[in-house]
Amino acid sequence: MGQKCPRKRQYFLFCLAGCLTIVMLTSGCVVSPERLETEEHLATASYYWGRGYFDASLRESRKALSFQPQLLGDKALFQIGLVYSHPENPDHDLTKAREAFGAIINRYPESPLRPQAELWILILRNLQDTEKILVSRKRELLRLKRQLRDRQDQVKKLTDQNKKVISAKDEYYQKLLEQNQKVTDAKDEYYQRAIEEKNRQIRELEENIDKLKEVDIKIEEKKRKVTP
């Protein structure tokens, strides 16, 4: 992958340079070298991002942002937000993604990317809130499972003790054991129902996350269609 990446980049930059040259010659427009270099970094960042080279995409985006922040800084920040919000990125970080999109709103209030950045912030905030709830519910489920396991261990110890007593005592102890077993079964059933309810809630949260991700994907598809 390390050898293929530079070759693909060289081919891509060659095509980009050719396209920009044709546009300049046909339109008569003069583009500053600084803008050309910034656009080159952004185009390379987008190319890497689309092929899963997230570190390289982030590096190119930051170069564009630091080189000429006033020219295309909003686009560089938007690309950085996309890198951090991508679920396949090993360094996936929703907080950093929100910071990048928020920087567009604060630094470039007139940017045409501001509505998209605001929408991304809303989606990422909802995802983070849902993930927090999911983590909390999973912890609660683990706690209930531990309680159930401890209870079952206690029941086993108590049952063993009762068996020893029954072997030496009369029918009274036998009846006492049966009553204790009924109580134990009732408590086990309570914990089992509680676990099933928590599992149901977790499945609902996971379905909500999947729906939010589908919205995320649809927004990204619309962005790609709009972006030239």
Image (cartoon, rainbow, N blue to C red):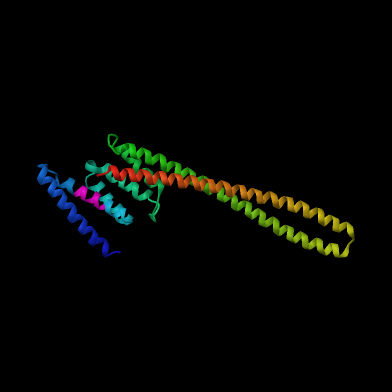
In this rendering, position of residue 69 left or right of residue 106:
left
Name the magenta segment's main secondary structure.
helix
Asked whether 39 falls inside the magenta stretch, the response is yes
Residue 50, given in percent of the width and then of the height, sits at 31, 53
Residue 125, given in percent of the width and then of the height, sits at 43, 41
In this rendering, position of residue 102 left or right of residue 44:
right
Which residue is depicted at the point 10% across and 44% down? Answer: 26
Relative height, residue 227 to residue 2 (above, below): above
Quadrant for the N terminus in the image = bottom left
Residue 113, given in percent of the width and then of the height, sits at 30, 39
Which residue is depicted at the point 38% across and 43% down? Answer: 98
Quadrant for the C terminus in the image = top left
Residue 97, given in percent of the width and then of the height, sits at 37, 46
- Comparing 17 with 65, the one in front is 17
- Comparing 212 with 133, the one in front is 212
Question: What is the quadrant of residue 2 in the picture?
Answer: bottom left
In this rendering, position of residue 147 left or right of residue 92:
right
Q: Which residues are magenta?
A: 37-44
Relative height, residue 145 to residue 25 (above, below): below
Asked whether 19 falls inside the magenta stretch, the response is no
